[in-house]
Image (cartoon, rainbow, N blue to C red):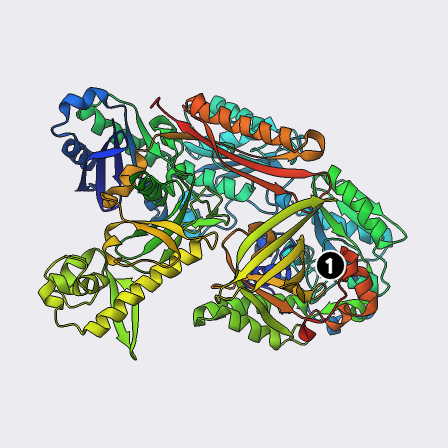
Amino acid sequence: MKLTTEDLKDIARGAAFLGTGGGGDPYIGRMLATSAVEEFGPPDLISVDELADDANVYTIAMLGAPTVIIEKSACGDDVDLALSRLEKYTGKKADAVIPIEIGGVNSLIPIMAAARNGLPLVDADGMGRAFPEIQMVTFNVYGVSCTPLAVTDEHLNSLVVDTGTAKRAEDLVRVCSVDMGCSVMLSSYPMTGKQVKETAVTGTMTLALEIGRAIAEGRRQGDPTAALLAALRKTPYYNQCKVLFDGKVQDLRRETTGGFAVGHCVLAALDGSDRSMEVTFQNEHLVAKEDGQVRAIVPDLICMIDRETAEPVPVEALKYGQRIKVLGVSAPPIMRTPESLAVFGPQAFGLNEPFQPVESL
Amino acid sequence: MRIGIDVGGTNTDAVLIQDKQVVRSCKRPTTKDVSSGIKAALSEVLSGQRENIDSLQAVMIGTTHFTNAFVERRSLLPVGILRIALPAARGTPPMVDWPKDLRSCIGDACHQVRGGYQYDGRINAELDEEAVRRAAADFNARHIRTLAVSSVFSPINAEMEQRASEILKEEMGDAVLTLSHTIGRIGLLERENAAIMNASLADLSATVVDSFRSALKELNLDVPFYISQNDGTLMSADFVEQYPVLTFASGPTNSMRGAALLSQMKNALVADIGGTTTDFGILSQGFPRESSIAVDVGGVRTNFRMPDILAMGLGGGSVVREEAGKVTIGPTSVGYRLTEEAMVFGGKTLTTTDIAVAAGYADIGDKDRVAGLDPTFVEACVQKIHAMITEGVDRMKSSAEPVPVILVGGGAVLVSRDIPGTSEVIIPEESGVANAIGASIAQIGGETDRVFSYEELGRDAALASAKQEAKERAIAAGALRDTLEVVDIEELPMAYIPGGSVRIKVKVAGQLFAQ
């Protein structure tokens, strides 16, 4: 299947939903991908089954501050260089690229890379949503090495990082990215087709596309939230989904600790009852509690949408009085195993509550 | 004493204001040349006031002329675009997301050259001055006279945009220049879009401002005149000639500011009920609450300071129907044809105005023509109208606390009952000319929007420095120092990067004259 510039609009909206409040505004990613598709032609989206077991697959992503990328976006050569530096280091030409993260801006960067380099794009990713750090990836959980990885900037400076653990790589890359201007390109997790099949969250580019289409179609028919839920219920993994709360933002508290914006959003019910929900976020939404009871918790997806239009609402756009539906969506089984929870479960974000599947709450 | 004028698509309204009171007001049709409509309105409000003319301090004009021109693609010039960003941002070229018909108005004279800054003001790449000269040669060859110049992180450091403009002037003589840092904030594409839009309006703005000037001159009004901008503050006429784009959202802003003055309230909800829609907005400290999302103008994404407006399809001309026992109102409206199509005017279409007359709380047209309507049905319609207003109020409110609501616009007659969730409903006199009144409020603003490091400076020093910058800008624009007030402060921690970097936005406003 070829991804057209029309598809990119739906993917961007779906990616904003899967960003669960964070991941950066996909708008700029859509512009980058649109320009690349217009210049180089639409890339092929392939399923993991179409991938040869010995194919060489690399992730490609942008890392840094979303506030910076809206001002200083990529040049294109930096994306190509990240891939070619990694190819040179591993001695293996890329056969395909794969998103590391389907939520937010990083769902679109691999489309740009695939179009520019004439490579197929794998319909899968390593997060199934958005997470803040590069070790929080299923590839890492199931034994793929994050490194060697290549980091580049628009001046075509590059670094290759080789570390023992993905967490160490994250720490080093994060520090470098600040000096390089807070928006860098990153190609990491070099792996084989077989490894992709064993460790990736599959079908997520199609998922983003379908979510975006369902919202757009639902608006034409009058009930975008219902259309969105219906689309999710048809998917193999994200099918346990529900509206956790229908309310309006009553309080918003933000603080910055250790470089992460931690915040709490309190919503009051719109049905006249005195129910309230508190959603805690750290770039992405982590836990949603109704009157103190957990209703959904990371890695399950907590997504806020505009209650009329179902437009995904990112954390930075939250404001007093906004009317919001909070959705809880099941993360795929591969993300709910004890191994996965150790890397991106509640405790990895400093929460005390244990993980419980959204469908049981 | 001052005069406020609102030049709309249909009417030109004028008000004469003294000590915050409306002395006279009038409505005249907007004319094609703009100037004669203004003269007609001015002559009317000034008639019998000749002895007071010496105390006239200023004339303030609000206009939707430039917005309409851009949306309708009228009188737009081809623009030469210079972006100083390479090697960054090549992946998102200028006008990447513009509608095709607009792109063809603007043309493809676009040059990207090396230069720009980092988020913290460090140089990202030195300015390639030779490339700027080559771009100028190309613009000259294409006979382009109006230019938009953008640079990466120019809101944080504007030097390269300024240096490039010097070079362009050397090479191109009297070309009209729009530098992106002067009109926009962080977000390169959106700021650049605004600069391009602005540049494309260069001819029209010169013509329109000139027609304002000549109208005043012909009436021998030798006073300064100002034009109101998006956030409700004023710009001098010379400034508007350079930055017409800054008037893009002044319409709804003026109506809300006018409502504030008429009701003497600084914090309230405003519902502007027109013929087709009701616009709900929030007044906070006398200024409209701003929208936090990107706003499209004529299909182009911008990040202007736009008021946060909720538009609902309810107005004095909204069509009323009954389907399967349920009342529906709008969104279709008879609009300006109300006086022909509404039943009270002898027409055949049932409108909300007819309902208000039938229910006995409005006296418009011939009430006998709606006497035959079923009272139960009329009551159901009245309830529906009030339910719609109630919903709009509730959706815009920022807390559960009851808020005062100010109703303005010709459709305010539709409301006769209490609105749940409000502390009071105020319908000021003269609310039909709220826009002109809003334009007459003399305040001058200033704004900062940039990134500070809390780790280096500490929060207090960073905030103080941001406020100082905003104040200096307001003073440069003509505000009296002692009257400056901070209207809004926003702190946005930068996500995903360590180091305590915070983007601070500060807005201040002050008086233009001593009161």
- Residue A93's place in the image compared with B512, above or below, is below
User: Which three-letter amino acid code belongs to the residue tagged 1?
Assistant: Ile
Quarter of the image holding residue A21? bottom right
> What residue is pinned by disc 1?
A100
Q: Residue at x 19, y 72 (%)?
A: B375
Q: Quadrant of residue A338?
A: bottom right
Say what secondary structure mark 1 lies in. loop
x then y, percent, for residue A232: 61, 73
Of the 4 image quadrants, the one containing the N terminus of chain A is bottom right
Q: Quadrant of residue A180?
A: top right
**Residue that appears at 62% across and 64% down:** A291
Q: Can residue A237 be spotted in the picture?
A: no
x and y percent of residue B341 in the render?
16, 63
- Residue B102 vs B44, above or below: the answer is below
The front one of A15 and B347 is B347
In which quadrant of the rendered image does the C terminus of chain A lie?
Answer: bottom right
Q: Looking at the picture, how far across and down is residue B313, in whole percent?
A: 33, 60
Question: Which is more toward the observer, B400 or A217?
Answer: B400
- Left or right: residue A317 versus residue B23 is right
Residue furthest right as drawn: A164
Report the side of A141 relative to B463 (left or right): right
Q: Mark 1 belongs to which subunit?
A: A
- Along the viewing direction, whichever of A295 and A175 lies nearer the viewer: A295
Residue A53 in the image: x percent, y percent?
Answer: 82, 70
Any part of residue A304 in sight: yes
Q: Is residue A140 above or below residue B492?
A: below
Is residue B421 or residue B457 the one in the foreground? B421
Label 1: how many Cα within 10 Å (few below 14, some 14–19, many 20+): many
* Residue displayed at 77% across by 46% down: A151
